[in-house]
Structures are given as C-alpha cells and as structure tokens.
Image: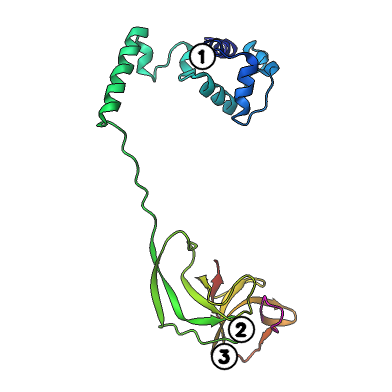
Amino acid sequence: MNSLGTIIATYREKKGLSQKGLAEALNEYGYSHSNKAVWSWENDKTEPSGSLLMAICRILCITDIYKEFYGENPGNPLSLLNEEGQQKAIEYIELLNDSGKYAPAKAVIIPFRRNIRLFDIPASAGTGSFLDGENYTVLEVGEEVPADADFGIRISGDSMEPQFINGQIVWVHQQETLSTGEIGIFFLDGNAYCKKLKDDAEGLFLISLNTKYEPIQVKENDSFKIFGKVVG
C-alpha cells in the first residue's frame, strides 16, 4: 500500500509542477489552498477531502487512484498487464474508438408531454364571468406546466395584478377545499373568479391582490364552490 502523500508527490513531479503550482491549479477548481497545504498532504501530515482528491487526480492525470494506493485494481483488467501490455491494450482501444462502431449508446431523453384542458371562457380577475365546464380546448404541454395542474384558465381583468395579469393562463389543481391565504378558482352565484381565499372570524371572503378592488364576501345562502388551487 502506497501513501497518498507519496502518490501526489510522484505525479506532481511527473507533471513538472511545484507545490505552489499545484495549489494554484486547484484554485481554478474552486479550492483555495497554499503550497503549505500541498506540503502537508505529500508528507502525510493531513489528507485532502474526497472531492479535493478528485480535483488533484484530474490535475495530475491520476486515472486509477485505487491501483496507485493499493498496488492493483481487480476491477481494472489493465492492472493485470505490464507496461508494454497496457500500452498495446490502450492502442487497441483507440482503434475501436476511431472505428466509431463501439461507442456507448447515448440515452435519448424524450420530453414528457401531456394533454390538459384550457377553458375558453376566462375566470374574471375583475367582475367575474361564468366558467362553462364544457367549453374548453385541449393543449399539449410539457414541463413548463406544473405536474399537479389539472386544467388551465385565462385571467380576465386586473384585480389580481401584479401577480397575474389580464389574459394570462393560470394552471389549477382541481380540489374542493382551500386554506385561507391560498389562491384558487371559485364559483360564486353564477360567476367564476380567480381570488385569494380569506376564511377567518370575520367571515368568508374572496380577496383581490389589486387593492383597488373590495373583498367579495361569501354569504351563507350564496351558491359557492371551489374549483381548485392555482399552482402556476
């Protein structure tokens, strides 16, 4: 078993680097160390951390630190060959690479796509307009739409500015309950709204983010329903 310090010193000298030169090279990888730190590693006074050791190996071209440390690497068939045999094996590998026939297959990442409903009649962020459950188009969407969204709807008006503007599509997770402070799509007496829910001792209210609009109180005998929570 070789000491880690000896391995670093040997490869550093092969590379023609001084201890200061190795420290400066490590700075380019985001590690701030002085030549005193390099001296400490090479004399086995301290040891670099795992990620720092990987940077050292890359700078010094140490391709098999396991073999250098233990003397052999059973997982590397080249370690069973002498230097001449290793060179011949490397030359053959280069021929295989140059042929282009044996390159590892590259994984093809297929973007996730799905269909989602976009309601054509906008939910009002101002005066309110009716949400027709049958009047929608189907859009194909990808990762730009939150995974938990069940449908989309266009905002109409300016009462939810600055977070949501007129004509913007909001994406909604369909659910029947919301906590106070959450933004959702609501049905109230024939109109559909995008509002923030306020439910406290003062009562139940639909709140606009634009402060020029007054809260809409939901009264006991009103026809009220929660369509879902705005998630994007």
**The label number, if any, that marks residue 189 in the structure image:** 3
Front: mark 1 or 2? 2
**The label number, if any, that marks residue 126 in the structure image:** 2
Count neighbours of disc 1 (C-alpha within 10 A) and say few if under 14, some if 14 to 19, many if 20 or more. Answer: some
The image shows residue 52, relative to residue 161, as above or below, that is: above
- How many numbered discs, if any? 3
Residue type of the residue flagged with mark 3? Asp
Q: Choose the circle earlier in sequence order: 1 or 3.
A: 1
Residue type of the residue flagged with mark 2? Gly
Determine the image quadrant of residue 55. Answer: top right
Does 116 appear in magenta?
Answer: no
**Disc 3 + disc 2, Cβ < 8 Å:** no
Q: Position of residue 44 (x, y in %)?
A: 64, 12
Residue type of the residue flagged with mark 1? Phe
Q: CA distance from mark 3 to mark 2?
A: 15 Å
Q: CA distance from mark 1 to mark 3?
A: 77 Å
**The label number, if any, that marks residue 200 in the structure image:** none
Q: Which residues are magenta?
A: 206-214
Secondary structure of the residue carrying numbered label 2: loop
**The label number, if any, that marks residue 69 in the structure image:** 1
Q: Position of residue 222 (x, y in %)?
A: 61, 90
Work out whether residue 149 can be spotted: yes
The image shows residue 145, relative to residue 54, as above or below, that is: below
* Scheme by which the image is coloured: rainbow
Q: Compare residues 137 and 186 and report the one nearer the observer.
A: 137
Determine the image quadrant of residue 226. Answer: bottom right
